[in-house]
Image (tube, helix red, strand yellow):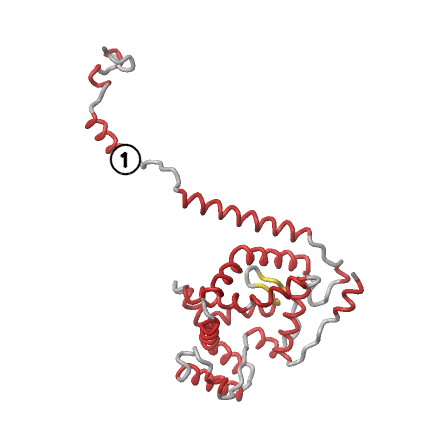
Amino acid sequence: MPNKRCSPSAGCTPLQARPSRADTDTSCDHAEQGSPRSESPSVTTRLLQAQTWRIALVLLAALITGCATTAPPPGQRDPTDPWEPFNRNMYQFNRTLDSAIFKPIAQGYDVIVPDPVEDKITNFFVNLRSLQTIINLALQGRAADTGRMVERFFLNTVFGLAGFFDVASMSGLPAFDEDFGQTMAVWGWSDSRYLVLPLLGPSTVRDGLGRPIDTYSDVIWREAVDGRGYGIAIDLIQMRANLLPLEEQLEDAFDEYLFVRDAWLQNRNFKISGESETPDYDDFLDDQ
């Protein structure tokens, strides 16, 4: 009996209406070759997409929460932090991103890697950044300290097995930590506005402008730019793991943003001038 869907009047015969299995397979092969076949996403893809959306929603919530955070009126703000509303929002954004991604990775890393190994990894990356410190010490005109830092780098690299062992500290050589932001402060740019950078965290306008200069002399970052990013990934995870013991202090702080800002500025001023002024938290608490 002829197939009703295919009749001679339609330009085909009943035999064409019931193609053989071979003909069907051949037609499917041609169809696959002629046009791409749509496939449903795999379970793994769906999970990755769901996780991506989840992180995006968390970050959006952080920005909304940050925008709702109140800051003092312009006349009552700290002179070093006139952009406090923006900085608070950016700080909240960074903290949310850290809690969702970086902190869990660092916690897992800290559980897996033994403490002595973490210490050696920290020593290795600190030694690699010696070039940045040597250059900035020279730019600041500190010839004697430049020589000490060169000696320190030589001892740790040669006798400390590429810096994994801090032989220089065992020998009594002082350690230095200098960057181009400190160099510009020595040159005369002493005061700069506080600024929280996306992902990078606390900084100032001066120090933020100095980061690209330091990056050029940073072997780890240059390797990452050349496509070899595994080194900087380990370095960043190790640095975040080193900060895990401070989490309890942040959680106990009356105002986490002010605690981080004042502590960072105090440490920064000490590095530049050797002097440190502790913020008057009693006055702050009395005003609340």
* Residue 217 visible in the picture: no
Query: Between residues 75 and 28, which one lies in front from this camera angle?
Result: 28
Kind of residue sitting beneath label 1: Glu
Residue that carries the numbered disc 1 in the rendered image: 32
Query: Residue 165: image x %, image y %?
Result: 44, 80
Depth check: give the residue in front, 36 or 244.
244
Look at 56% across and 82% down and name the residue there. Answer: 140
Looking at the rendered structure, the secondary structure element under dot 1 is helix
The image shows residue 38, relative to residue 225, as above or below, that is above
Of residues 105 and 112, which is closer to you in this image? 112
Seen at 43% across and 77% down, the residue is 164
- The percent coordinates of residue 73 (x first, y second) are 76, 58
Q: Quadrant of residue 230?
A: bottom left
Q: Quadrant of residue 85?
A: bottom right
In the figure, 54 relative to 200: above or below?
Answer: above
Q: Quadrant of the C terminus?
A: bottom right
Question: Which percent across, then down, holds residue 168?
Answer: 48, 85
